Image (cartoon, coloured by chain):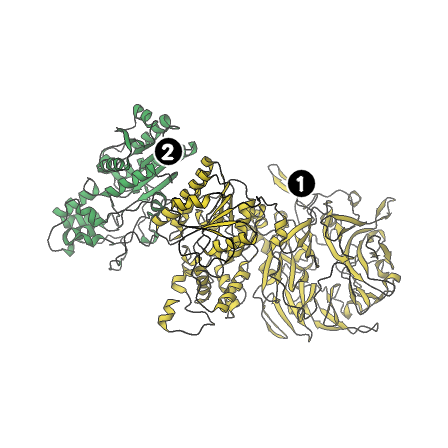
Amino acid sequence: MKVVLVERGGGLEREVRAALREHGSHVLESLPDADADGARMAGEADAVIDLAEPEATSARTDASRARTAQQLLRDASGRAGRYVFVSSVLVYAPVPSPDSWPIQEHYPREAHGDPSSHAYGQDCIDAEDIIIREWAPRGLRYAILRPAVLCGSATANVSSGLLEEARRRPWAAARKYAAAGVMQWVDVRDAARAVVLAATEPTVDKDILTIAGLDGFTGPDVVDALWQGPGLLDDARPLKFDTAKAGVVLGWRPEHRISESLATTGSMGFDRPAAPSYRPQAPWQPDWGGARRAHRPPGMSEVW
Amino acid sequence: MRSQDGVRPGRPSPAGPGPTGTGLSEPDFRPLAVNGFGDPANSYVHCMSTFRGSAYAGTSRNSMALLKLFPPPEPALMDPWPVSVPGSVEDLDMHGQIWRLRPDSDDWERAYTSPDIPGKQGRDVPRDLGYRGMTVFQGESDDEPALYVGAISTVLRGAAARLLRSSDGEHFEAVGEPGLGNPNVSTLRAMTGFDGHLYVPPAGEGTTFNSNRASLIMRSADPVHGSWLPACEPGFADEENTGIFEMEVFADHLYAGTFNARNGYQVWKTPATGGGPCRWTKVLEQGAFRGPRSEIAMSMAAFGDALYIGSAIQNGGYDRVNKVGPAAPELVRLYADDSWDLVVGEPRQTPHGWKEPLSGIGPGFDNELAGYFWRMAVHKGWLYLSTFDGSALLPLAGKPSRTVRRLLEFHGAEQLLRMSGGFELWRSSNGVDWIPVTTTGFDNAYNYGARTLLPTSRGLFVGTANPFAPDTPARLANGWQYVPNPRGGAEVWLGAPASHERRQPRRRRSGARVLLTGATGFIGSRVLEVLLGQGDPVRILALPGTVDGLPAGSGIDVIIGSLEDEHALRRAVQGVDTVLHLAGLLPGADPLDLHRVNVQGTASLVAACAQAGCRRFVLMSSTAVYARVLERSAWPLEEQSPLGPRASGPTRPYGWSKVVAERMVRRAASAGGFEHVIIRPATCYGPGNDDSDALVRSALAGPVDVASRQVLQYLQVDDAARMVVHLARAAADGDIVHIAGPEALSWPVVQSVVRRAIGVPAPSGGLALERYSRPYDLSRARALGALPRTSLREGLADLVRVLREADAPPLGRRSGVEPAPWAVAGDGGTRGDRFLAPRYPWQPAVADAERGAL
């Protein structure tokens, strides 16, 4: 399979390249953006994979992703075999109540968060709209992947930022990241596998798929885990995102638990006593009942 | 009535045998006449009878136009009028007709047409506008039984209704004096033989066709010579009785029901008196103590040990002349000792004690638009009851009643018409538990009544009232316009088992082999039975260890293997004409397993089919593929409705696996050049299935959840199997068809039905059909001739019976097409995992440990 990568830096690209190699696919071209030459090249590819990570492009809130989609549509439509667009769970409107979880692909979209996240989320929404509105009627296949925060050794984003901060100033980190609520980071290797499956599986047609990890947890949970052991993060909270559709369509499921992912970052291994006082309670945060959920077999969450 | 030859009448004996077979369902009916026998002016099949082996039908004509030209004092306000009306009645062809259906023929021939008589304007006019009563009777001067027909007259021209007689079915002659001696009589309606006499109550006067001042029953032992005498005092000496509407013979008595707009109908009876004066006694009054809302004793039938009486309010359930109604009709049953039960209707206190409807069903079968319980008949041990339903008039209602306004505001006229337009036909084997046969006038909203039911050895004839012809208003861009109505005019349907199989030609290749996957599953095993029953050579692909239960000696070609075994797949499809792919994992399976089996397994099978040159691939998908399956605002879902399941829980990944499987089949069929059909069944239920068992136990647990808004349109598994096999042949290449149960019930109704079937207390009332909000539209399946037979009420009762007889845990098979309601999000009140009843009422209490195993 011949693939064109539109990449903007970040660890995901490295893992996708590795996964493509393993799959036996050939990367025709790797482009920083879809310029005219790139679009022409895309027309010769079996799949165009448009990668990005929010943090890797946080400085670029200039609608570049939407422009890329538009460019590819204009120049490569009818020739490109499939368009795999890596979007983000940032496109989902805030769903603070666990009563409405897990969030599914049809949930409303609304950019939100800090200015950088908001801009990136809106860029992704605009690009998705172009793909959905204009690619689909032309009979082209696409897969829009919406990954949660990527974590693992290859990433340099919010996950690595949190870990770094938690090591240096756990109280401040716990307080700062408590407002983010429940997170469901996905290991970058799992995300890369999903990207390759989305590019290669014949089952894909016009699909939007949420990609997230096996475990739900909060920022303070991460700080806890950093000081008491990463295993505390497994099954810490109810899952926020429903990845069942990716399971059915792609045959994909994350293989790495959050504890394994964090272990690869080198952030773990401290042997210091826990400091309960650094766990703030966000004003919106529901009563979890104080009890961690019983251990489940991997992937057998209440989602399915 | 002494006897009939030819086609045997199905009139019941009071203590007749129990039901024969399962009773007729909608698929058993087929049309024998449409568009008024080819003349849309025939509005009503007003009477039918069998005579000398042939079936006869008398019609009345242009009913809706006549109503406009000769309106009652308080006419119904409709704007525009339901049909276009000429300026004068002379512009209408009003010649009444009698049609004949020869034995074993489906072709009608006109047996008689009203002659002309000189009119007042010097032009010839028809003598009879129609024929309203018909029976076979042998009077003193009849050498053998003769066919007697009561006419509707042109009484304004001075010609009262006459009685026709035919001894050979070919020639009809008038006998006796017009109007049975009363020149004002406009129609002769109920005609009943009893005690050597023909009893006939003139039913109209002047331009009024229902009531009259005389309010008499006339009788004659020799109708040929017209010696008619009153058989009762006028109105049974009650001046409020303004008509005798219906008569029936029961328990050696003749029963007569009256029209009484002030107090409600009365029922009188007389024993045989051998020609002496009748000895009438009143056995029921005041509309069974409901008052004028049971204005007319409209229909009667002797069934079992009781006489069943259906009520009505004239003019479609709203008598504006007498200011009665609107109200839906009731059904009562009267015993030989004059005691009575309320079967369908309003609970109430009566002089005979508190009366609760035995059926648990409210007036009109809980249909507020039902105007009459119009006809009843007993056929093969089942009591059938037909209604009048005014839905077809709703879009034209100029001044709707409060009830109608509420329905219109909530559902809209179009939706009402689409979902529940047309008469209803119900049946019961015991007079108490009622099963709907059709709630849509056999899918024709213009059939606003089933006016005639005729049981015969050939089947049950249903003659309809359909006056919406030749044209009817349609709302176009420039307002209401009259357009030709292709579905207008009276119809005759014949109900006989397996009639539906004649509707559609089979696309079938002799000896063509069928590959069935999933043949050992809940639905697949039934599909296998159907295929084997039709003599098809069948090959199945089955997992190791699952074939022990296959029928011995059936000649099934068994390939052992899974969908992941390419070698087995290649062997399985070799030489196969059609593949029925039912195998798959069910809701609750892991998404990766769903991907592996339901998606990739299907892809592997279609690839093998393409390679082997199979002609047709039929995929068993599911209604779980729809995006808005839980949203009432999106109902009824059609095959084109958006896909992409959204509910949380096991439905979603399962539904997506079917979405992707469909995708793979379409893609492969397009590339591989073979035909494909996708069938999407709703949840199936039936004996031998864990989910069905859980459904019953969930329905039994706790109090009836009256707050639940969950609606079930479940499909009986044998129906599903039959429909799948039918569609596999009848559907066109690329067809997508969803199949579901014939009607929908809310969860609280399901709970009540199950409780009633088991015999545990259930709340009174509340057994209404979900007439206006069904999840699935079955138009496509209907067009292809695939209709479900088994109503959910009946199927649940059967399921309970099987469970009771088995008195054992279920067999452990899953249906696998859509999760059970208690597992579907959106209605937490029915989650069976929390509310399963620990045991059935007939099972003894068990130890807690054992109970947990249940």
Percent coordinates x, y for residue B558 in the rendering: 46, 51
Q: Quadrant of the N terminus of chain B?
A: bottom right
Task: Determine the residue located farthest toward the right in the rendered image.
Answer: B225
| SS assignment at label 1 | strand
x and y, in percent, of residue B37 in the image = 73, 47
In percent of width and height, residue B48 lies at: 74, 56
Q: Is residue B458 above or below residue A186?
A: below
Q: Which chain is green?
A: A
The chain identifier of the residue carrying mark 2 reads A
Question: Which chain is rendered yellow in the image?
Answer: B
Q: Helix or strand or loop: what does disc 2 sit on?
A: helix
Amino acid under disc 2: Ile
Residue that badge 2 annotates: A130
Residue B482 shows which numbered tag? 1
Spot occupied by residue B145 in the image (x, y as percentages of width and height): 82, 62
Label 1: few (<14), some or many (≥20) within 10 Å? some
| A183 relative position to B90: left or right | left
